[in-house]
Image (tube, helix red, strand yellow):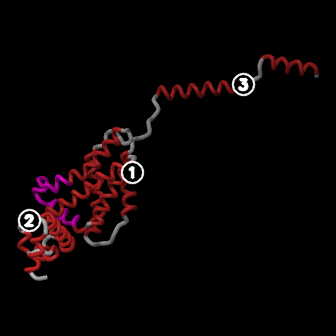
Amino acid sequence: MTKTATRKRASRLPREKREADILAAARAVFRLRGYENASISEIAERAGVVEGSIYRYFESKRALLVRVIEDWYSGMIEEDSHLLPSVSGIRNRLRYIVWHHLKALHDEPGLSSLVFLEFRPDPNYRKTTIYALNRRYTARATAVIRDAVAAGEFRNDVSPGLVRDLIYGCVEHHTWAFLRGEGDFDIEAVADSITDVVYRGLAAPAPQPQPLDVALQRLDAAVSQLNKLSLAAPTEEGLQNIERGRRRR
């Protein structure tokens, strides 16, 4: 395709469509090349636009990467808003959260690595929209833990924020070798294992009987035993009959 033809094609596209094409192309290139090795020229070629036109929409390659990651997070948050409400039971909801994060990292290792390597080490990370989106994304875990504590299913000394960090930290640590390109992992099996460890560790202990309850139980057992003995013992009339029988002999 010549540059003239590319310009004509670009000029006919609505602004929203051009922007969407650029973002789709950038996502593909960042996935494949990472940030440092990604080039605006390759993104432009994939999007079917001239290189200079990209800067009409995004001021820099960094700004383009930020938008790609923001869109990725927004998509995952929207997916959760549709799927998580249909999952019933604390354990099942907890497993969904673990499973979904595992799947996100497995499906998008390139974007995941960019978040870990390009954004989290940034001293200003907590001031970014990506950090805010990550907080929204992980807030569902905090909500599930709070619901479990309120329902008495988890211990009341549990810190929802700490458990959230434990879940996502565990998932990300376990998958780090995969993100480096070393091997693979079974999403379902890992989700089951992490869920089991977290759930068992947080589950509220079975209620213990109170001292008065124990005393009443023992008293009931003693009365029951005495009743059995009284039924088995001969009555006075029975003893007299036994004595008469002996005399007749």
72 relative to 156, above or below: below
Q: Which residue position is annotated with label 3?
A: 231
Residues shaded magenta: 111-133
x then y, percent, for residue 74: 21, 56
Q: Rate crowding at label 3 as few (under 14), some (14 to 19) or many (20 or more) other CA atoms within 10 Å.
A: few
- Frontmost of labels 3 and 2 is 2
Q: CA distance from mark 1 to mark 3?
A: 53 Å
Q: Secondary structure at mark 1?
A: helix
> Could you tell me which secondary element the residue under label 2 belongs to?
loop
Q: How far across and down, in percent of the image, does residue 207 sit?
A: 44, 36
Mark 2 = which residue?
57
Mark positioned earlier in the residue sequence (1 or 3):
1
Residue type pointed to by label 2: Tyr
User: From this viewpoint, is residue 39 visible?
Assistant: no
In terms of secondary structure, what is the magenta stretch mainly? helix
Of helix, strand and loop, which one carries label 3?
helix
Question: Distance between the Cα atoms at labels 3 and 2?
Answer: 95 Å
Place of residue 93 in the rendered image (x, y in percent of width and height, measured from the top left): 36, 50
Nearest the viewer among 41 and 100 is 41
**Mark 3: which amino acid?**
Leu
- Residue 18 point in image, percent of width and height: 14, 68
**Residue 130 magenta:** yes
Judge by depth and name the residue closer to the eye, 39 or 231: 39
Assess disc 2: are there few (<14), some (14-19) or many (≥20) residues with their C-alpha within 10 Å of its C-alpha.
Answer: some
Residue name at image x 11 percent, y 77 percent: 6
- Whichever of callouts 2 and 1 sits on the residue coming sooner in the sequence is 2
Q: Nearer the viewer, mark 2 or mark 1?
A: 2
